[in-house]
Image (cartoon, helix red, strand yellow):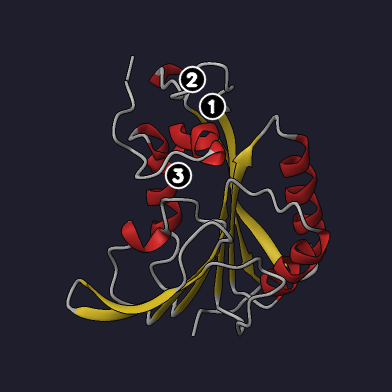
Amino acid sequence: MIKLKNLLLEMTDDGVEWDYLLSEPYTARNHLAAAWCKDSKKVLEVGSYKNPIYKFYTEQNTKLITVVDSKTETFEKNEKIGSKNVKISSIGEKLEDAKITDHDTVVALGLHIPSRESFEVFKSHCQNANIVILEGAINWPATVRQISEIIETLSQSHNVIVDITLDFSNSNVKPLNPSIPVYDKRRFIVLKIYGKQND
């Protein structure tokens, strides 16, 4: 069994619930998403929790990574990735309140946007993106519905080019709170706009 230690700087109710997503096996989700951002110029990640995508990005094409999560801190900084500086914009607000422009790539790992207003804003960003990367538990009803709705919304403009199930059941990761369930079977999807390159 893989034990989780010192993963969280602060223990909050939400932190206890989702701490297993910070474990090494589950960061495969983050590395996979980052790999699909390799040609992106501007990346928007919604709901990054404590593993924002810029911690996993290793390419040198992106100029801006924007992270929107009501639980994160608000700041801007330049971070050196490879030989280039990438602007990191972290916005600790709900998506409906964040004032951001469209990005060519949109990422949502652990997709579950409780606010309908924020979800409609999220769909709008997806419609204007070249690449959309979605991931979430296959047995979380809200996630299943939202993924299906986004795929349907983008069906006339984007192809589903990746649709796989990630099975972490053999990793034996346990949450710090043993009463919290682990969602170890997850769907990972990449949608790409028809016939357009990121610019």
User: Which residue is identified by label 2?
Assistant: 169
Query: What amino acid does circle 2 point to?
Result: Ser
Q: Which residue is drawn at 29% across and 68% down?
A: 59
User: Which residue is identified by label 1?
Assistant: 184
The CA span between labels 3 and 2 is: 14 Å
User: Which residue is identified by label 3?
Assistant: 29
Label 1 SS = loop
The CA span between labels 1 and 2 is: 5 Å
Tell me residue 120's x, y (percent): 79, 67
* Circles 1, 2 touching at the beta carbon (< 8 Å): yes
Question: Taking 50 as reference, is 123 above or below it?
Answer: below
Would you say residue 88 is visible in this rendering? no
Query: What amino acid does circle 3 point to?
Result: Arg
Q: Considering only order in the chain, which callout, 2 or 1, is on the residue closer to the N terminus?
A: 2
Q: Seen in the image, is 86 located left or right of residue 195? A: left
Tell me residue 85's x, y (percent): 25, 81
Classify 10 Å Cα crowding around label 1: few (below 14), some (14-19), many (20 and above). Answer: many
Q: Which mark is residue 192?
A: none
Tell me residue 96's x, y (percent): 72, 71
Q: Residue at x 47, y 26 (%)?
A: 168
Given residues 36 and 15, the one toward you in this image is: 15
Q: Which residue is drawn at 58% across and 28% down?
A: 183
Which of the 4 image quarters holds residue 136?
Answer: top right
* Circles 3, 2 touching at the beta carbon (< 8 Å): no
Given residues 194 and 191, the one toward you in this image is: 191
Given residues 163 and 125, the one toward you in this image is: 125
Question: Taking 175 as reference, is 79 above or below it?
Answer: below
* Circles 3, 1 touching at the beta carbon (< 8 Å): no
The CA span between labels 3 and 1 is: 12 Å
